[in-house]
Image: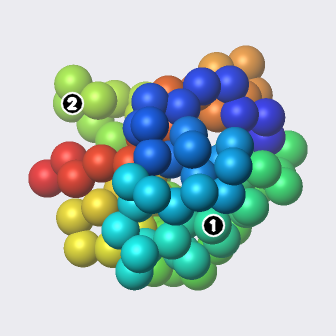
Amino acid sequence: MKLRSVRHKGLQRFIENDDARGIRPDLVGRIRRMLTALHSVDGIERLQGPPGWRLHQLSGDRAGTWSLSVSGNWRLTFDVVDGEVANLDLEDYH
């Protein structure tokens, strides 16, 4: 899937320059694997990862936003717009 937009500045720097400043060091490897998986699939329905990633759509006021579990309360969240990843964020949303 193509990446349309990134909200988290540290994540943006990581994607563009492989510069992990702004991301906790213990999360970098897992985030790299998740980003690689997102980039390599044709659609969100084809994304498969280990069960620990817990890919799911949020509900309530965040309905439609997708979430991948990074560690603890940290999640990669994003929308899928026209088959592209939009508003990619690294957040503690709990």
Position of residue 83 in the picture relative to residue 32 (left or right): right
Callout 1 crowding tier (Cα within 10 Å): few <14, some 14–19, many ≥20: some
Ranked by sequence position, the earlier of labels 2 and 1 is 1
Position of residue 29 in the picture relative to residue 25 (left or right): right
Question: The disc labelled 2 sits on which kind of residue?
Answer: Gly
Instruction: Write the residue at 24% across / 73% down.
Output: 72
Q: Quadrant of residue 26?
A: bottom left
Element at label 2: helix
Name the residue tied to disc 2. 60
Asked if residue 50 is positioned above or below residue 13 in the image, the reply reads below
**Count of picture labels:** 2
Asked if residue 76 is positioned above or below residue 82 in the image, the reply reads below
Q: Nearer the viewer, mark 2 or mark 1?
A: 1
Decide which of 83, 9 is in the foreground and name it. 9
Q: Give the number of the disc on residue 41.
A: none
Q: Is residue 79 visible?
A: no
Pinpoint residue 88: horizontal percent, then vertical percent.
51, 37
Callout 2 crowding tier (Cα within 10 Å): few <14, some 14–19, many ≥20: few
Asked if residue 64 is positioned above or below residue 93 in the image, the reply reads above
Q: Is residue 63 visible?
A: yes
Position of residue 66 in the picture relative to residue 94 (left or right): right
Q: Are marks 2 and 1 in contact (CB under 8 Å)?
A: no
Q: Quadrant of residue 5?
A: top right
Pinpoint residue 84: horizontal percent, then vertical percent.
72, 29
Decide which of 92, 24 is in the foreground and name it. 24
Instruction: Write the residue at 21% across / 30% down.
Output: 60
Pinpoint residue 42: horizontal percent, then vertical percent.
85, 44
Name the residue tied to disc 1. 32
Question: The disc labelled 1 sits on which kind of residue?
Answer: Arg
Distance between the alpha carbons at the discs numbered 2 and 1? 29 Å
Instruction: Write the residue at 42% across / 38% down.
Output: 8
Residue at the extreme left: 94
